[in-house]
Image (spheres, coloured by chain):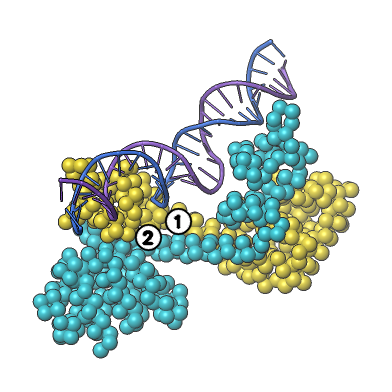
Chain colours: A yellow, B cyan, C purple, D blue
DNA sequence: CGTCAACCTTGACGCAACGTAAAGGTCAAG
DNA sequence: CTTGACCTTTACGTTGCGTCAAGGTTGACG
């Protein structure tokens, strides 16, 4: 059985252009060309195309499919394993994105006049997640994915009232930051209050508290420029002040 | 506070090229240009960039971000809601891909000489899933995602022995198909046996049996050219013979 | 035998969101 | 005044095709 481009294309549910492209990149060459230069495929190419489409469905790049198909010595299992990891990472990323969008949508409930603030909340949260990944490996191992999910649920179930409370507490944090900025003494009573308030604020969105995570977040406040800019807006050196207070607090 | 491209880029963790590109597409214009044509950004642009990066993290296309940012009348909530659906679909797709890769990797256990066959198994399964989506909505509503997951688990936990059994049964299905092909009578005893064998074969990878799904799959055997080609290879008109036998079987 | 639709060919641009030169101008430090 | 680190615009490469464009081939019909 022989096929022209269009015939094979319809058989396999792809476009003619796709077959020409596969020819072009050397992924699937026709069995032969007829006297006027038409591509002629045989049933052998049908089989190969089937395999190609299978891997394509899995999102494997055509270059890699080429290797899998044409190089019998190629370690297909390894390639698939690798691809599996890639896909998994991407899926996990999307999972996080979904959670963030949910939260962003929910936080819209908080009213209109603080919209910009909310947007920053979203960013903060993103950074919090990054922080978790950087500093909180142990915590993740301890509590696993469940914790993360709980955190989202907690946030999701947060009422508008809670949300406003959370913002009020953040204002208190700011006020204490300004106070501590005068002495810059992380061992002072106000510094302790600052760290405690910050913990209180944190607990609105964190399902569990751990000193390690708290300190990790504090370190990131200083390390991440965008983040520290947020606190430095409140008072010069705000991020460092907050960090020092927290570090001293968690280490008694 | 004013920034050059590089400064703002480092502050926000993006490349200078990105900022130039955002300028080019009108997403983020610098506050002004200096006398020699350098881009100068103010802290206002920092804030806007923050928002842009937030949405970019969510995978929102830059064109849409542009609307969200620059058009205050734009329904951001609706846009995010829509985007949420998009991302969810993509994530679900990746979930399925992961399951398929897993299965493909597992099926490698089945031995080397039937590798090509296995690849087709993967394709068949992909089509089975599509079939489920097309014809099996009711079933999905009945059993939900759990069923699908169970199906994968069942496959995952299938031993090499089971796998070989499954293939042996498929051979029996082929033999019966050839027999029935002589009379083409879907009401014959052999046709009944054929349908039953096919069900038996099916149950290796399906967690539950339903007549609707079985018939749906049968219909697809005929509707999908690539699929029917697989059965037509066994015997001419094989897909139709199998379909008719199954249809008669499930309707007593 | 002509012709007309439906195929086929190669070539080339477009898409998203930049990365990466290339070719040249600007600026602050030494 | 030179050097190196910045800045500018222009433009091509990436992935997997979709979509013209301009022209040749084929097969059915009158």
> With A251 as the anchor, is B110 left or right in this view?
left
Instruction: Identify which residue, A165 or B245, lies in the foreground.
Output: B245
Residue B124, compared with residue B37, is above or below; it is below
Residue at point 57%, 53% (across, down): B61
Residue A216 x, y percent position in the rendering? 67, 53
Residue B252 x, y percent position in the rendering? 25, 89
Q: Which residue is mark 2?
A: B101
The quarter of the displayed image where residue B131 is located: bottom left
Q: Is residue A252 visible?
A: no
> With B133 as the anchor, is B233 left or right in this view?
left
Neighbourhood count class around disc 2 (C-alpha, 10 Å): few under 14, some 14–19, many 20 upward: many
Q: Is residue B93 visible?
A: yes
Residue B145, compared with residue A145, is above or below; it is below
Which image quarter is the C terminus of chain A in? bottom right
Q: Chain of mark 2?
A: B
Residue at point 16%, 56% (across, down): A1
Q: Secondary structure at mark 1?
A: helix
Which residue extends farthest bottom? B252
Do the numbered discs 2 and 1 sit on residues whose CB atoms are within 8 Å? yes
């Amino acid at each position: 059985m022989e096929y022209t481009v269009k015939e094979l294309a319809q058989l396999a549910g792809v476009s003619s252009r796709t077959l020409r492209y596969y020819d072009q990149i050397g992924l699937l060459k026709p069995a032969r060309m007829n006297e006027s230069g038409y591509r002629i495929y045989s049933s052998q190419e049908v089989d190969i195309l089937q395999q190609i489409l299978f891997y394509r469905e899995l999102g494997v790049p055509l270059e890699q499919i080429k290797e899998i198909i044409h190089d019998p010595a190629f370690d297909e299992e390894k390639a698939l394993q690798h691809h599996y990891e890639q896909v998994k990472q991407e899926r996990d990323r999307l999972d996080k994105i979904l959670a963030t969008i949910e939260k962003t949508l929910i936080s819209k409930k908080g009213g209109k006049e603080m919209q910009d603030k909310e947007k920053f909340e979203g960013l903060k949260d993103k950074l919090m997640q990054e922080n978790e990944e950087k500093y909180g490996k142990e915590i993740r191992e301890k509590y696993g994915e469940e914790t993360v999910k709980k955190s989202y649920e907690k946030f999701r179930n947060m009422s508008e009232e809670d949300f406003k409370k959370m913002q009020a507490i953040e204002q208190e944090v700011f006020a204490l930051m300004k106070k501590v900025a005068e002495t810059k003494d992380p061992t002072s009573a106000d510094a302790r209050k600052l760290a405690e308030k910050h913990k209180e604020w944190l607990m609105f969105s964190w399902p569990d508290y751990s000193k390690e995570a708290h300190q990790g977040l504090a370190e990131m406040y200083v390390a991440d420029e965008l983040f520290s800019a947020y606190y430095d807006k409140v008072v010069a050196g705000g991020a460092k002040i907050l960090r020092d207070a927290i570090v001293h607090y968690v280490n008694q």
